[in-house]
Amino acid sequence: EDFISFDLETLTWIAPKPQAYSTKLRWDQNRARNEYMKNYITKECVDWLKKYLDYGKSTLQRTERPLVSLLQRSPSSPVVCHATGFYPNRLVMFWKRDDQQFHEHVDHGEVLPNHDGTFQVSVGLNLTSVPPEDWPRYECVVQLKGIEDILVPLDPALIRTNWGGDGGVQSNIIIGSVVLLLAAAVGVFVGVFVFKRRNDSAKQRLAGSDTSSADPGEQNPAPEAQPLNTEVN
């Protein structure tokens, strides 16, 4: 509730509460100040707001299209419609059946921030009471101002899971396993190569040491003894 307010037509102050009446009387006497107040509110303040809006246009009018996926942890788990990477956070997401918004067995998650300033949200659908033949009647709807509605049908081929029936997660697991195996093979090859090089170098050093430590007599034979000359002149 306002304590005191300003009337732009009469250039006087209005005191809704008795405690503000003395302030009203004092401010009403300052006519020049009240004239300035009217000009500030109707012109100067409006101009500044327009400038600030223009400065922040790129952020205020920014729209990021969400990436929408269907996720399921196990065959008995709900199917979750997950949207991420969208901006602003005023996104509407729901399940519908036969073109009508569906509320039963639906769990709405909170909008959460991402590290890059965008947002994510999920809406789960419990399928325990939905027979497989009725799945084509359901679809997830994502609405965000500035983009067309995104419709994702409840199709088993589109559901990403950790237990099978999905190429996305399974392919990632297979690719990761292959990469690990290749890395291990390269590591073994490099280890064998380094070991062989070191072993060969050690053998060469050992052979050189054996040659240099051989019997000196074999390498430098002693000179033959000369006969003693005993002839007397």
Image: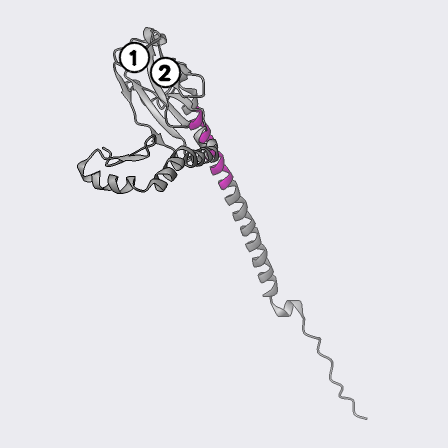
Give the answer, above or below, for where 88 lies relative to 151.
below
Q: Is residue 220 visible?
A: yes
- Residue 102: numbered disc: 1
Q: Is residue 138 above or below residue 202?
A: above
Look at the image and say whether residue 122 sits in the magenta stretch. Answer: no
| Residue 23 % position (x, y) | 24, 41
Q: Is residue 172 left or right of residue 17?
A: right
Q: Quadrant of residue 33?
A: top left
Residue hosting label 2: 140
Q: Amino acid at mark 2?
A: Cys
The residue under the point 23% across, 35% down is 15
Q: Which residues are magenta?
A: 171-187
Mark 1 crowd level (few <14, some 14–19, many ≥20, 10 Å Cα): some
Can you tell which mark lies on residue 207?
none
Label 2 neighbour load within 10 Å: few <14, some 14-19, many 20+: many
Dot 2 falls on a residue whose secondary structure is strand
Q: Mark 2 or mark 1: which comes first in sequence? A: 1
Q: Position of residue 194 (x, y in %)?
A: 53, 47
From this view, report whether residue 173 is shown above or below residue 193: above
> 157 or 10, which is in the foreground?
10
> Mark 1 belongs to which amino acid?
Phe
Q: Is residue 131 left or right of residue 199?
A: left
